[in-house]
Amino acid sequence: KGLVVRNTAVLHSDDGGKTWSKPRLVTGFDEQTACLVRLPDNTILLVFGHKTDGSGQRFMASFDEGRSWSRTVYQLGRNCQYASTVLLTGNRLVSVSHRIIDGVGIFHSRQWSPPKKTTIGDGGFWIPRPAEPLGVARSR
């Protein structure tokens, strides 16, 4: 029940996907197309696109299976959209995204390392709220 539009919500299952939690909003308006990456230390990164001040990629972190998320949101890239991120060996990540240069769409990749856990934790954490069902529009 409920619909999430132009935001990112997370859900979890404790029974192998038979049942799911209610969606909880983890990003603001126009922050979407996200992916989750689990690091070797079990930190989960949520890498997501934004169209709030230009376009680009950001990420935040969770140390508790996604129940809470870092208050600090890190800027990953600008002028790019629709990224997907995977973990490489050596705790390095690569994000591939789409960008337009001189009217031509290209793919762009970036290798990066996450900040240290202590750095992430310094900003504190917050707990996402449940997604509220949207109203139903009726035609006349």
Image (cartoon, rainbow, N blue to C red):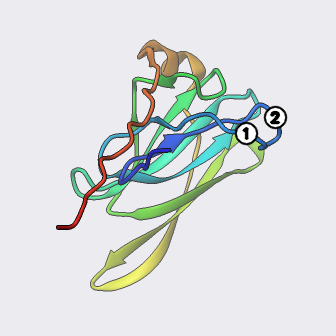
Residue under the point 77% across and 47% down: 89
Label 2: how many residues lie within 10 Å, few (<14), some (14-19) or many (20+)?
Answer: few
> Please, what secondary structure does the residue beneath circle 1 have?
loop
Hey, what amino acid is under mark 1?
A: Thr
Answer left or right for 122 relative to 113. Answer: left
Residue 13, percent across and down? Answer: 72, 36
Q: Which mark is residue 19?
A: 1
Asked whether the residues under the numbered discs 2 and 1 touch, taking CB atoms below 8 Å apart as contact, a structural biologist would say: yes
Give the answer, above or below, for where 95 lies relative to 140: above
Closest to the observer: 53 or 89?
53
Total number of numbered labels? 2
> Please, what secondary structure does the residue beneath circle 2 have?
loop
Instruction: Farthest residue to the right: give it.
Output: 16
Asked which quadrant contains residue 28, the reply is top left
Hey, what amino acid is under mark 2?
A: Asp
Residue 134, percent across and down? Answer: 33, 46
Give the answer, above or below, for where 140 lies relative to 117: below
Residue holding disc 2: 15
